[in-house]
Amino acid sequence: MPAFRPVPAIRMIRSLARYDCRILLDLEDGIKDPENVAETKRRKQQARKDLTAICAALPRLKFAVRVNALDTTEFEPDEHLLRRVPNITSVFIPKAEDADAIAAFARRHPKHKLHLIAETRKGVANLNALLDTAAKQQIEYVFFGNYDYHLDTDIYPVREQYTKAYWDIASPLIATVERHGLRFGNSPYAQLDDVGTLQFIYSQLTEKCSKPFAMMSLQRWQTAQYCAIANGNCAPVKKKCRTADSRELDIQYRNSIVNGLSFALNNITRRIITPHEYLLWKQQHG
């Protein structure tokens, strides 16, 4: 979840206590205005304050944090925050590409578990070399970031997880990750109420992974469904999937930016519109 608005965030986190899940607070894609650099910087400064407040209010909980990419100007203040907040125990490193940079980060933060996100053309192509790192003992999962990957490769519409094209990308990544003795983490899925595809995703991961895997959720109800599926308590459901149309992407997403949100939610279709998809749509339509 985005690291902002401490009061509702704390309420949401407490409501998740019944589920076997981890809490990931996001300082990267969830905190940005893709059309305004100055506003993005302001939001990230506030998000660090909000994240500190959230962690302080729940001192017994252990949190994961997704920092900004290691080669960005926003990373240094993120790193200062990691040193100040004691109940951050794991760090998600987005746009992982440089094995040396990851090893250097691991040396500076030996107590943090690492979660790498392969989500760029370079990161995916060089995953084998990326995982041959001295930091391997600290790496807990290696995630695939589907939406960032499509943005970096200029592919639109996004190949969603109910398609063969998605698993043609993910399957070799799973094999590479497990060949290095590590565990795979799957990309989030934007159609929140599509239980049929959530079940399909779980079955694909069960088939393709020989080690325990992770599934990233975007919303509390989706978390509940993943837990039910994993426990065998979810009845089969088929639901038609769809991509966002032009009206959603142009109007719904712009409204979300005005309200301080990086991800838009269409309450009718229950579909998340990601900033990556919006930027890809803009490139296509001018």
Image (tube, grey):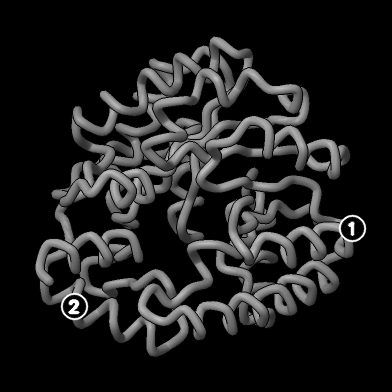
Disc 2 to disc 1, C-alpha distance: 41 Å
Task: Give residue 278's position: percent from left, percent from top.
Answer: 26, 66
Identity of the residue drawn at 53% across and 40% down: 117
Kindly state the secondary structure of the residue where label 1 is placed. loop
Q: Is residue 44 above or below residue 231?
A: below
Identity of the residue drawn at 35% across and 33% down: 201
> Alpha-carbon neighbours of circle 1 within 10 Å: few (<14), some, or many (≥20)?
some
* Amino acid beneath label 1: Pro
Q: Residue furthest bottom?
A: 258
Q: Which residue is mark 1?
A: 86
Instruction: State which quadrant residue 78 falls in.
Output: bottom right
Task: Give residue 123's position: percent from left, percent from top.
Answer: 46, 34
Residue 117: image tag: none
> Alpha-carbon neighbours of circle 2 within 10 Å: few (<14), some, or many (≥20)?
some
Q: Which residue is mark 2?
A: 250
Task: Give residue 168's position: percent from left, percent from top.
Answer: 26, 24
Left or right: 219, with 240 as reference point: right
Task: Give residue 270's position: percent from left, percent from top.
Answer: 28, 66
Q: Nearer the viewer, residue 150 or 267?
A: 150
* Amino acid beneath label 2: Asp
Left or right: 32, with 200 as reference point: right
